[in-house]
Amino acid sequence: MKNQIDGERKMKRINGWIAITLILGIFLSSLYARNQGTNPEKIFLWQLDYQTNKSYILGSVHFLKKEMYPLPIKIEEAFEQSDVLVVEADISDANMSRFLRLTMEKGMYTGEETLKQNLSEKTYRLTETVLKKNGIDIVFYQKFKPWFLALTISGIELMKMGYNPNFGIDKYFIDRVSAAPVDGTSPKKKILELEGIAFQIDLFDCFSKEENDDFLFYSLQEIFQYQKEIDHLVEAWRGGDAAEMEQLLKKNLDKFSELTPMYKKFIDDRNISMTEKIIHFLKTDKMYFIMVGAAHLIGNQGILRLLEQKGVSVSQLKAY
């Protein structure tokens, strides 16, 4: 009985922030890097110049620790100068109840269908082992779809290490806009979305049975290396080390070659559509502060390279 009560309590805590977790791209849990850049003063912020428009694009880290603040001055200045905040999805408090409802609708089985019926034996046993390590019986998750459970377990591990979505970079700036007073002295920033939470949830919910199994299995495989890898990711972000992040991404894609089609769907294809929207923004007279997951910016198929191909001047900035 005690285990059941503890399990139910943990589920309630998880459900309180799971809508945020869904947009984090935990699929990229293997995308971590060491801060070995040649110029540690650089940050994951780029200035975009296109025709007469000047804007900024920031590679976001969605889980951070409180002690990571304050952010570098240049990031704060770019945000203050901008007219519009652009994010992948608006996760402001006003939208959270809708996000949570949609997440639960898409991420849970209905009727008699269960998690065990939809997993291979090896993935089910690995899931059972990881949950037991957290003091949770897998019986409490039989109605969770594999992708939903993968994100939930990944979120548990991150929070155990002190990383919290409430301290994520995008959440930080969204809250800044939402809390800004309307005093008539200056217009309140708008928040625009590149995708939206419904789109991102649908990316997961369109998984085939085999993709669901692979996603959960490889997510759990990476959990055993989270502590070292997450810390390296944050250090790479702080040092603006895009080259090292790109190198490690390639290494991990080679390591998990089975996930290459999924990576294309989650990153490359989305980069193309987000780039088109960013170009549309840059054709206006507004200054934009754009935030996307850091993995979307790097590499030959990354947003930065795609923007350059469309005539945008891209310049990485320094912290001060």
Image: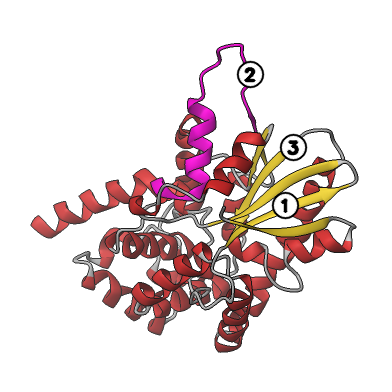
Which quadrant would residue 90 be assigned to in this image? top right
What amino acid is at disc 2?
Ser
Earlier sequence position, callout 2 versus callout 1:
1
What amino acid is at disc 1?
Gln
- Kindly identify the residue that appears in the image at 51 percent across and 24 percent down: 180
Q: Nearer the viewer, residue 31 or 7?
A: 31
Q: Secondary structure at mark 1?
A: strand
Q: Is residue 193 above or below residue 132?
A: above
273 with respect to 40 (left or right): right
Which quadrant would residue 140 be assigned to in this image? bottom left
- Kindly identify the residue that appears in the image at 55 percent across and 15 percent down: 182
Q: Nearer the viewer, residue 229 or 255?
A: 229
Instruction: Identify residue for label 1.
Output: 47
Where does the magenta region start and end? Answer: 166-191
Instruction: Identify residue for label 3.
Output: 287
Colour pattern of the rendering: secondary structure
Residue 202 visible in rendering = no
Instruction: Identify residue for label 2.
Output: 186
90 with respect to 46 (left or right): left
Residue at far bottom of view: 255
Q: Secondary structure at mark 2?
A: loop
**Tag 1 and tag 3, C-beta contact below 8 Å:** no
Report the Cα–Cα distance between label 1 and label 3. 11 Å
Q: Position of residue 158 (x, y in %)?
A: 35, 62
Report the Cα–Cα distance between label 3 and label 2. 15 Å
Q: Secondary structure at mark 3?
A: loop
Q: Position of residue 252 (x, y in %)?
A: 56, 83
Q: Position of residue 195 (x, y in %)?
A: 67, 47
Q: Position of residue 113 (x, y in %)?
A: 43, 61
Residue 118 visible in rendering = yes
